[in-house]
């Protein structure tokens, strides 16, 4: 990985909005919240897939959310094709620290010519840094909803 930027804030403080505004042209995935669900959006193509729901639509769950492992498999498949350039991942947290979600891609990016931007809630920054060997040289952007 060439560089890493961590966009941080609390729940609903504007991390995804920041990424939508500042990461145009990047490859990767955004988590779009609508109602009681999150959709995974391919930043390049705009294709969306239902990722998580508060309703038990999927067999896998994490906290209050039921998630579609197939959506993560799709995203990781696309991400692992990327060898270089700007990449955005929204959002990296406990699921990734435990080895799920975007974890396979995050591990692979260490060996690639990637400028990575990730959204991480403030509380999870130390866990994410440790799990994915993200050093103190990573630029931190703290976003607060006004």
Image (tube, rainbow, N blue to C red):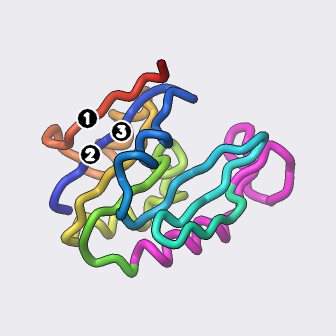
**How far apart are labels 1 and 2 at the CA level?**
6 Å
Whole-percent x, y for residue 114 in the image: 24, 65
Question: Which one is earlier in the sequence, the residue at label 1 or at label 2?
Answer: 2
Which residue range is magenta in the image?
52-80
Which residue is the extreme one toward the top?
Answer: 146
Q: What element carries label 3?
A: strand
Q: Residue 52 carries which label?
A: none
Q: In which quarter of the image is the N terminus?
A: bottom left
Q: Answer whether residue 21 is magenta in the image.
A: no
User: Depth check: 36 or 57 in front?
Assistant: 36
Q: Residue 5 carries which label?
A: 2
Whole-percent x, y for residue 5 in the image: 26, 45
Whole-percent x, y for residue 46 in the image: 56, 67
**How far apart are labels 3 and 2 at the CA level?**
6 Å
Numbered-mark total: 3
Disc 1 to disc 2: CB gap under 8 Å:
yes
Report which residue position mark 1 lands on: 140
Q: What element carries label 1?
A: strand
Report which residue position mark 3 lands on: 7
Q: Which residue does the image show at 42% across and 33% down from the upper left? A: 124
């Amino acid at each position: 990985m060439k560089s890493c930027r961590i966009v941080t804030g609390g729940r609903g403080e504007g991390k995804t909005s920041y990424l939508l505004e500042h990461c145009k042209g990047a490859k990767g995935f955004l988590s779009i919240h609508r109602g009681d669900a999150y959709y995974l959006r391919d930043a390049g193509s705009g294709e969306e897939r239902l990722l998580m729901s508060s309703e038990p639509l999927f067999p896998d769950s994490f906290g209050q959310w039921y998630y579609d492992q197939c959506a993560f498999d799709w995203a990781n498949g696309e991400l692992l094709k990327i060898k270089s350039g700007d990449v955005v991942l929204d959002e990296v947290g406990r699921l990734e620290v435990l080895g799920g979600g975007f974890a396979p891609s995050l591990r692979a990016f260490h060996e690639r010519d990637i400028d990575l931007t990730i959204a991480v809630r403030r509380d999870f920054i130390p866990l994410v840094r440790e799990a994915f060997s993200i050093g103190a040289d990573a630029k931190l952007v703290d976003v607060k909803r006004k």
